[in-house]
Each structure stands twice: as structure tokens, then as C-alpha cells.
Image (cartoon, rainbow, N blue to C red):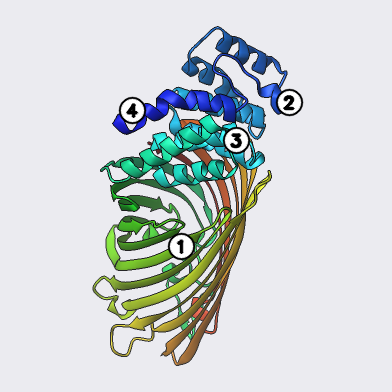
Amino acid sequence: GNADTCVVHQNVHAAENEASPRAQSSITTTALGSTPFAGSAEQSTAAAMMSANQSADAVYRYLAPFENRYAGDVDFDYLLGTAAYDSGRYSQAIFVLQRAVAMRPGFAGARMELARAYYAQGDNESARREFAILDKDNPPPEARRVIAEYLDAIDRRASVYESQLAGYAELATGYDSNANGAPDIQDFIGFQLDSRNQATASSYYNLGAGGLVSYPFAPGWRLLGTGSAGYRSNPDATFVDSQVLRLGGAVEWRPGTYEFSLQPNFAMTMLDGEDNSQVVGVNLAGTRHFEQARVSLSLRSSQSRYADGLEVLDVDTLAYGIAAQYTTRAMPRVQYVGAITLGSDDAVQAGSPQGRDVTGLRAGAAVDFGGGHALLVAVSTLTADYDGAFFGSKRSDDQLGGTLGYEWGGWRALGWTVRGQLNYVDNSSSVALYDYNRIDAGLSVRREFR
């Protein structure tokens, strides 16, 4: 550790013995109550390993394979989380200890370990939040002193330049009933449609990679940089094979429970190996954080520019919205989300009919069942009223979307996540050429690096 943390680390274990049922030389998880893990052969073996002063790394490696069986059990999560922390696996410790705290918010020992893991990971604001909760619960004197030392160290360290880097690689495959998002008709206003303008089903595969760098530069301030690249192949609709590059940045300011950000971004898309479009934009957002919820306001301005021959599609966009999120404490833990977006696209080319007013709604829930199992459900609507005439008709679209997903993170501690997802879109348009529906069923595997 650095000079700011030496004193804290010298005193933290003594405080833990007052704030937590875990002692350094023995396991006392049975004091938390009888659970499937308490009294099990696995718990007894782990206790014996600790009594024999085996390393935290050895204890972690022994317990990790049982996560799929015992995840969500407070005794197990606490022991696995502390072993992960003591062996330097801070990301894994955070993930596991979050479960323990969610199951038992009053478990001061687990919250202390979670706060320490956040601090060790460099997430100052999350660590500050957890230490502040502990401090409000009237902890024993030694624990209160250590909490104060951590909070002081966070204040000092927040101004130190520390960068963090994370990345991912992803492989996905699936089936798309309408890969080109086209209508299920063969002719329009008396003209035969080209096959590329008719709904075309195809299997597909995706390759993707991306990363993020975080750079705190003053108390409450940080810079962010993000980048991602993706390739999608549609064997039966190669004319919509796509390559996408996205770059973004942000400057964030977090005064207390508020967060403000300014985010410039850029995206470039190619279709079938040829330039298609570029989007340059900037997002401005403000968020108010609560203990179990957050509310955000956002404003986005962007310019979409298409390749030669497609300039009629060029638009300038202005959109604003409000979003809210609420997470329950008990398991299965449910995170509810909702958002409203209003905006407009202004056509750049004179006479273009692409200008429109847009209203969007979205609601959903993510359910964490423990053991690495999670379910995602979401529905959305989008109404678009266009300014110009399309083939002599006024265009108005009403789109309904739905998502059902399942995620397995049993190997999340090793960086692996598997997700299956079903997406449905029904775009009802007053102009038949833009009336379509689409079902996309896919499976993806992601590997994260930190």
C-alpha cells in the first residue's frame, strides 16, 4: 500500500474483531445462524485450513468451485469474499460481498470488508459510501477509529492521479428473422421490390471487443475513455454485414450524492465493407444517488452523416430524457428501471422527409437469483412522426419492443459471463415500406479483463 494506507492497514484487523464475527485465526460463521454452508463439510475444511494458517489464496482456491452451490448463502459469501480480499482479488471480493450485504444489510463485518475491497480497488466513492453507512450504525470505538482513518485516507488519495484499465472480448451467435429490417412484401405502389428490400432471415455471429480507462485527477473528478469495435456476419444476408467502431470520453464530477458528466462520443458504421454513416455527439447528464435508487436527467446533441448517395438521411438530433432505477435489498434482488425520452431529428438536406419528432418509453427489471443466475425483462415503445411525405403519404411509426434474457455468471470471478437473449421488434408504419417485425434469438459469451 501507499503512505496514506499504512496506518489504516495496521489497525483494521483489530476493528474487524469488534465489527465482525470473523477472527483472524478461526471461522465463526455459525454465529450468524444455521445455513446450508454452516456445518457443511466444505465449511469444516475451510475452517481447518485457516486454523492451520494456510494462505488466503489457498482458502479462496478451495472455496471458489463451490460458488455455484452456495452463492447467496451469507456465511459462504462472507468467507469467500474475505478470502478473495486477503488474497488480492479485489474485483471478486466486491462481487461476492455485495451479495452478503444485500442479503443481510446489518452485517457490519461483511460491509466493512466490502468497503475495504472498494478502497483497495480504487473506487473511492463506493468505499466512502459503505464506510459512511457503517459509521452511522454506532460502531465500537476501535471500529469507528479505523473507519475515520479510511475516510481520511480516501480524502487524501482522491487527489492522486491513479488510472484504471478494464477490457472485454465477446463472441455471439444466433438467428435473426429479419436481418435487414425490411417489410414482408414483394411489391410497393406497383413496383417490384429488390430482394435486398424484402425481409431476409439469417443466422449470424458477432465478434466484439472494448475497453475503458478511468483517470481521477482531483477530489470528486475523473476522466473516462471508452472504445469498442464489433463485426457482425449474416451468412444469408451478407449485404447487411456490419462493422462498427465506437469511441467515447467523459469528464465526471461527483459532489456527494450527485454526479454530473459531459460525454463526447463518435461512432462509425460500415455495411458490407463500405462506408455507411458516422455519428458525432455529446451527452450531458446529471444523477442523484440514493441508498437504493438513482434518478438521472440527460441531454444529447448529435449529427448523423451518411455516405455519398445517402445524404438524404443526414439529420441533426436533440434528445432529452429522465431515467430512474431502484434496487431491492432482499434476495432475489430485483433492479427496476424506467426511462422516458423525447427528441427530434432535423433533416439537413433541403426537401428531405427524414425530420421527425420522437417519444420513447422503456421499463424493465433485472432479477438476481443468486448463484450467478439472473433474468432480464424489458419492454419499450417508440413513436415517430415524420415531417415530410414518403411516396406521397404522411409517415408515422409506432414501434413496440421486448427483451427476455438470462445471464449465468457462475464463472464471473474468473471474468466469464454467458447470456442468452430473445429480442422482438414490431414496427407499425403508415407507409408499408417501413412496416416490419423482427425476432432475434442469440447466445453470447463474454470475457472481462481488469
**Element at label 4:** loop
On the image, numbered disc 4 is attached to which residue? 1
Query: Which residue sits at x=32%, y=41%?
Result: 157
Nearer the observer, 389 or 1? 1
Q: Earlier in the sequence, mark 1 or mark 2?
A: 2
Residue 357 vs residue 17, the one in the foreground: 17
Q: Is residue 163 above or below residue 66?
A: below
Around disc 1, counting alpha carbons within 10 Å, would you say few (fewer than 14), some (14 to 19), or many (20 or more)?
some
Q: Position of residue 102 (x, y in %)?
A: 62, 42
Gap in angstroms between the C-alphas marked 3 and 2: 21 Å
Amino acid type of the residue tagged 2 in the rendering? Pro
* Quadrant (top left, top right, bottom left, bottom right) of the N terminus: top left
x and y percent of residue 119 in the render?
Answer: 42, 37
Q: Which of disc 4 and disc 3 is earlier in sequence?
A: 4
Task: Give the spatial CA distance, label 1 vs label 2.
Answer: 40 Å
Q: Is residue 392 left or right of residue 366?
A: left
- Answer whether residue 103 is visible to the viewer in this image: yes
Which of discs 1 and 2 lies nearer the camera? The answer is 1
Q: Earlier in the sequence, mark 2 or mark 4?
A: 4
Q: Which residue is mark 2?
A: 36
In the shown orientation, is residue 175 left or right of residue 21?
A: left
Left or right of residue 450, residue 384 in this image: right
